[in-house]
Amino acid sequence: MKSSQHFDETHVIHLLRHYLPSQTPLKDFIHHNSLHAFQHMKFYEGIFKASKIFGYQATLPLVDFRKLYAVKRIKEEILDRIILERKGEQTFSEWKHHVLYTAYDEHIDYRIGRLRSYWKSKHHLDLDNLVQPLLFRILSSYLDQGIALWDFPVHAEGFLASFKSLEQNGLVSFFKTAKARKLLFQEGISLTQLLEIVVGDEAYFEQYLFDQQFSHRGWSGMVATLEQKPESLLDTRKITLHDVIVLDLLFEIDHLENELGKNFKPLCTDCKQPPLNLFDEVPSTELQEVLKIWQDAFEWSYYDEVLAGIQQNISLRTVDQAIPEQKSFQSLFCIDERECSLRSYVEKMDANAETFGCPGFFGVEFYFQAEHAKFYDKLCPAPVTPKYLIKEYDVPEKRKHDLFYTDKTHQMASGFLSALTFGFWAGFRLIKNLWKPKMSPAISNAFAHMNEQGKLTIENKDPKDVENGLQIGFTIEEMTTRVEALLNGIGLLHHFAPIVYVVAHGSSSANNPHHGAHDCGACSGRPGSVNARVFAAMANHPEVRTHLLARGIEIPATTQFVGALHDTAADEMEYFDVALLHEANQMAHLQHKNTFENALDLNAKERSRRFASINTKGDLKKIRKAIKERSVSLFEPRPELGHGTNTLCIVGNRQISKGVFLDRRAFLNSYNYRSDGAGKFLTGVMAPLGPVCGGINLEYYFSRIDNYKLGAGTKLPHNVVGLFGVANSSDGDLRPGLPWQMIEVHDPLRLLIIVEHFPKIILQSIQSSPAMYEWYINEWVHLISLNPDTKEFTYFSNGQFIPYQTLSKEIHFFKDVHSLLEAAQEMKTNHIADATQENLPVILHS
Amino acid sequence: MEQMLQLFIWIPLLGFFISLFFNNTQEKQIAGVAYTSVGVQLIGMLVFIGWWAVHHFQTLHLKHFVFFKEENIEIFLEFYFDKTTAVFSVLGAFITFLVLVFSKYYLHRDAGYKRFFNTILLFFFAFNVAVFAGNFETLFIGWEFLGITSFLLIAFYRDRYLPVKNALKTISLYRLGDIGLILALWTSHHIWHENITFMKLENTALLSTHIETHYNAVVFLLAMVVISATIKSAQFPFSSWLPRAMEGPTTSSAVFYGSLAVHLGVFLLLRTYNYWDSVFPIKVAIALIGITTAIIATLIARVQSTVKTQIAYSSIAQIGLMFIEVAMGWHILVLIHLSGNALLRTYQLLVSPSVLGYRIHDQFFNFVPKQPIHSQLMAGKLKNSIYLLSIKEWNMDANLKSVFWNPLKYVGRFFYFVSNKTGIIIFAFIFVAGLLLFTFDDHIPWQIDQFLHIFFAFVGMILTLLAFVEKESPMKAWLFIILSQLYVVLSVALLNDQYQYREILIYFSGLFASGILGVSILYRLRKLEPHLGLDDFYGSIYRHPGLAGIFLVACLAFVGLPFTPSFIGLDLLYSHIDHDEYVLVAFLTIAFLVLELAVLRIYARLF
């Protein structure tokens, strides 16, 4: 960006879009790498560059790492090994001294905002303060999905056109000066012309626009996202980042003229500083080296323990490898790390039960239309675009309403009547909520996503049955392909139990704008109930069974699939189409339901140790009730802890992780290398792990590290804006990312993916697509191969697998995990050095 | 029975003091103390009211505690109990109790957990002082504390810019209202020659003769009361602070701005109803304010696209209706209306985050695409204009800024050239000279005397303005503040020929102690964090909670918070000003107005 360089409007807008946060409206909370714009670089390079440009925190501060070392969460032997590996023996002690004791200036002298700050330093003008409140108000009124009673007069031509028409057809103006108003109506006015007035020198334009748009990155990010994906609002709006920049500049001109007088001088008339290229190389510093060592040491201190645990577990298991062939039931769960504890309790309650993990859309991708719904819900991972539609019909129940959400209370006369009626009822409701929080229509209820008594259009008999370009239902062939792929992926090909449960998950919570972030990530942030039910129906279809047999998968006629939904906040389960079970299975189901109930009790107990409101040592049923109440309580900002603490992803047989207590930190994807020697299915299994699990993990990482700039801050003061976002107070910027209450238990560690297969096969899989390979080669996630023959670990680094030796000594064996859980202390404060101690060490259990 | 009244002041205060003794992680204890004390209050109130009902709702009053007594001035606490007090106190205890219980887990692990509960308890105490008050002085104490607690809760998250900015915005307006009350007090001292109690206002015969004899003064006094009530209830043209005040945790916004604090304006009008009932212009003014607000706030509420601002404006509109109801004399209706409105808005604010889920769900099933309508007709233009104005909140915020604050800032900046070391030395020198003059007061011709005290008041005012616009050094601003107070005292002392050393000593003792305290804290802070200035905000409270607490105490003494010596001094100073000293009153009033802002600005920016 030298001063001779030409300002290219389209290019700069393209760049802006790339770097702005890309969070969709909150109704679809899709986890993603907050620094996706830097993913083409190596992890450390990327985060330090982002930090230098935008002022984000890249890692924990040094003092926190040192505290973690002091409390032994970062282990000395690991730290030593990392320093040795990176710096060699000669400089070891010098670097160790740096790491432990040297004081560094950690202040980030970041690049964004420097140019625009001249308004403040030279003219005592706080443009943000003058421009933003009104700009935000106009934007949110234009985009509003249903809060205002009187809508912005929307024009089909888009945002700027609507603004113009409002400005033109009225007796008053948004502007203070005639100049800005005149410019608004000037035919074909370009950014360049406006920037010439505000900035002056063309060489500074790009820098200025970045400064300006990043001064409200929440709003600009939302606009950029809506420009690309207008359908993410139900009531769609046409808006472009370009329009917003124009208005932004016009308001700036308006205020500048108003404050500095007519013919004010542009900002860069006599700038002494040359224009800054924001994206210039960031020189590496000693501090960065030290931080890298610390972050690696923090990560491997935990990984090493896990790897040692798995290794010891395998060596113990080989003796009793013999799993009974006759299973009482099998159940498929989502890979979600919150299901990891429930799975082990199910296995514990019934030793003959077998559990599997796979992405929670169960390989069936489609749009879902609830009965009477005006829109479709996408139920598959975000990057997939389905071609199918599943419609709900014959729902016997009516949707319930909550009168308190009526518009009427905001009118003058009806507001008066509401105060006299609803007012006193509200007082009564508050008392009720105090003693008995209960599910109500105002609470996001995971079980309400689909009505269990309704019917679904699962089978397509006529390919002409199409709605809005989507085929209604799946043909037998399409069903077979999907069932086959899933069963192959998880390696469930023989020994089918009489009942196979397909358990999706969702989450109920009250008073929580971020509820979508708690639902299933593989279903675009929604409960996966429909997917579970659809998959079960497909796998039960007699014709599908015949086709499957032709493809070599024999499911006995006695075997039936049952869809179910687990509410991860309330710890409740619901089963679908149970009436279709044969008599024998009906009986068995009652028994299994009981097994699930008992497992849920224990699961609730395990979760309760992190909740201050529940006594973990108390009566099981009481705990369960308290857990359920949290999910419907209006005043519980932590109905559940979401993906907090997620760090691991294990792809392989359940046998390798069964018996290792991982404290709900592992995504578990079943995969059988034996039935997939050439790695034919492995690619399909690995493909979603980066974007789904890696995305979740990195969003938690960045929200935890910099909750102010990359996270949403504390939830408590949030104000819902236009039904698509949250902001602080009436004049604040939108807050993308995760709120503090969701990330305080999280240790900022990258995801470690452990795959049970030969390094060669794994490499071949991840190299099958550049997008997938980028995650691994650039180290945004770690990858380890567990060699099925030698049981040795090899670590993927710079394109190859290197042997890994664990340092952790013997992992403790506990007969009863619950004694450990009951003894666990709640964190003293939510500072990382205290918070991390709430996370329990890896242990083995029976 | 009257003796029972004081109990309802001491219970919350006791709760507040107990809650100071825990540390931030003792959440159970902190929350427990808070809701137990408010719960006890609630039960006590209900029992008391039952008993009171048996005694036929007889109005009660209790003269309680005399602060200061002199021939014609007496400052005392006085309590009063009637239907209005009954409704407000039960409503207050009920809502505060629920919100405290809900906050127990809502605030879990917040770095400001203790601060939150302490402040709410202090608020509850202030609220009770105000609603049980039996005279203007007592009411003022509650009123003033309420403002401070509001400020503390709006600026709860101090490490961000907007909360601090909006807290200052709110407190500046509150301060304007407080000044209204001070002026009302001043006028009333002059026309009644004693403290008026609300009991006395029930004597209609006495009132009517009184109003006849002092008609103009009474109109002025009442106008001040109405301004005060208008600001507290966020009525037109002072509405824009309310939506911006919702910066703290949702539960505190609900209790303050959804319900209790905003309805206090209505309370003040109810309390003074007998006084203004027969003063026609005031009555009309109240009704007009109510009507204008009801209409404008409804329009603004209709265009709000964020949920909390929508609730704020809807509530403001209802309070506008209440103003009309009070003016019409429908007092039972007002009490029912305000209770319902308070409960409704509290509830709506508490559940405001769930709007997203509910409404999106609703839209999912009931969406009807809207047809864009474009009308070039006059009606369309008018509609568009009203829409646009409502989006801009009828320019209320901008107008307040340009009418009230910009002139003050302008004057402050104009005199900024003296804001340096030389300036401070010169001012100190002039002060010593003034002090000498004061000692030889008897020998100075009265014309010069007259000129001098106005001059000193003027200098005092300019000094506070200088502190107010200071952008860099907190220490400099603080010194200006101290100096300004010295001038103010000098001015009033000079004026008054029968000066009383005792009063000046009382005032000084407060100022001096807090002034020194402030200097030492600022000095210490500068040692710890040398880069601190006044052009940014630092949230130092998270790093040095102790210093923040002590500095706040110093600040509060300075702003003449009730119970501090400076408060009594302030009140006395005002009562020593004769009723025809308009220029002096104007200067002093501005000085006091800006003083609090300057002091709290230092606190908010640094801590």
Image (cartoon, helix red, strand yellow):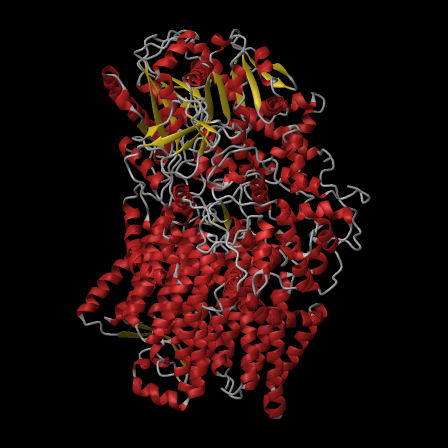
Where residue A551 appears, as percent x and y from the top left, is: 44, 8
**Which residue: 45% across, 72% down?**
B228
Judging depth in this view, the residue of B92 and B314 nearest the camera is B314
Q: Which of B481 and A26 is in front in this view?
A: A26
Residue B215 position within the rendered picture, expressed as x and y whole percent measured from the top left: 42, 88
- The answer to whether residue B150 is left or right of residue B125 is right
**Residue nearer the viewer, B607 or A254:** A254
In this rendering, the answer to whether A785 lies above or below A415 is above
Residue A744 visible: no
Q: Would you place residue B282 above or below residue A781 in this image?
A: below
- Residue B127 is left or right of residue A767, and the answer is left
Regarding residue B28, the answer to whether it shows in the image is yes
Q: Is residue A674 above or below residue A505?
A: above
Q: Which residue sits furthest left?
A: B54
Which quadrant does the N terminus of chain A fall into? top right
Task: Say which quadrant the C terminus of chain A sits in.
Answer: top left
Q: Position of residue B55 (x, y in %)?
A: 18, 71
Q: Nearer the viewer, residue A636 or A404?
A: A404
